Image (cartoon, grey):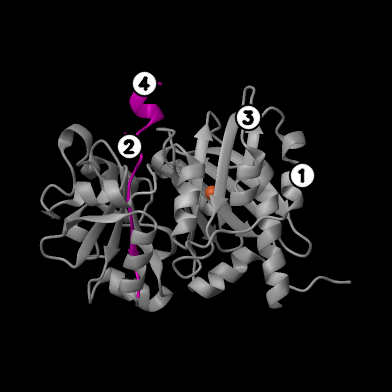
Amino acid sequence: MDHMDVNPMGLDGFEFCEFTSPDPDRMAAQLEQFGFVVASRHPTRDVVRYKQGCINLLLNREATGHAADFRRDHGPSASAMAFRVQDAKAAYDNAIAAGAKPAPAGAALDGIPALEGIGGSILYLVDRHGAAGSLYDDWDQVPGAAEAEAENNVGLDLLDHLTHNVRRGQMRTWAEFYGRIFGFEEQKYFDIKGKATGLFSQAMIAPDKAIRIPLNESQDDKSQIEEFIKDYNGEGIQHLALTTPDIFETVEKLRARGVKLQDTIETYYELVDKRVPNHGHDLERLRKNRILIDGNVGEEGLLLQIFTENMFGPIFFEIIQRKGNEGFGNGNFQALYESIELDQIRRGVVTVDA
Ligand SMILES: [Fe+2]
């Protein structure tokens, strides 16, 4: 196989994720609290590009069109995402030939080649990146944006993965979609069970090893995945994971700004030294910040992560620091699931048979 067969679309990471909200000012404030700044504005559309490190998040406030329809149906939501490809038109044609659906007519910004993505969102194919310049070159650049970013950032750098929640029976459908259209491979399969509910998860990784999409499917009609689908009124992006080179600094800055992060049971920290021997991190600082740690110092490498509470409707963020570990916090997945289920039990959404 030559290189093009391995990576038929020439995928090269995420370009952006687009959000929309009935209360865009609140969403904008949340993005700024999270360390993003407005870097550029679309010259004719009410679309703003927020930037931090290499992460681009668009806020679409257009009064009509796809994003407007999307926020009416879903509330605060992720209306689009974009993959970087080698040749967008060729990638689009190949995707359609392989059975992908085009994005609704007229829905895509600037006529960028676009497919129908998860839950009716738009999946853009962007080839204006790297040596080809930038998608935002024609946008109005905000004066002083670089200085503002240097001031406001919390150290976030890359969009690492973008997890989807799908309806029951659809995990394989979407795994097959990303596999057939883009050459993604199955990375890791999880069967997670809480006290009363459970989920299946299939992590997918693109041939560029930079685009990762875990797919979650409920095992029952009460789990946090089902609750998401009810709240969100459909399938969609559950969380976005953003990398940092120093999770302690990032998390301490976010906490100081009042960003709410998910708690972890105290007993988790009693077991860290045993579960991840010689991890070499300050256990007290981990515990204080509720940061999770996984992997090992040997072959697999370490991974540190923490999750925010729900930020945009039921969508939340993950902060992740990879130290050679390319997984998803396998040992933490169960712990995270249980802590959310505990919250569901407290809220009376889930009941546990005595
Ligand atoms: Fe994640």
Tag nearer the camera, 3 or 4: 3
Q: Which residues are magenta?
A: 1-21
Badge 1: how crowded within 10 Å, few (<14), some, or many (20+)? few
Mark number, residue 280: 3
Q: On the rendered structure, is 72 left or right of 93?
A: right
Mark number, residue 9: 2
The percent coordinates of residue 234 (x first, y second) are 49, 69
- Name the quadrant of the N terminus: top left
Tell me the residue at 21%/46% (across/down). Answer: 146
Q: Tell me the residue that label 1 is attached to.
A: 270
Upstream in sequence: badge 3 or badge 1: 1
Q: For the residue marked with disc 2, what is the amino acid?
A: Met
Tell me the residue at 56%/68% (across/down). Answer: 228
Cα separation between marks 1 and 4: 49 Å
Tag nearer the camera, 2 or 1: 1
Upstream in sequence: badge 2 or badge 4: 4
Upstream in sequence: badge 2 or badge 1: 2
Q: Is residue 151 visible?
A: yes
Upstream in sequence: badge 3 or badge 4: 4
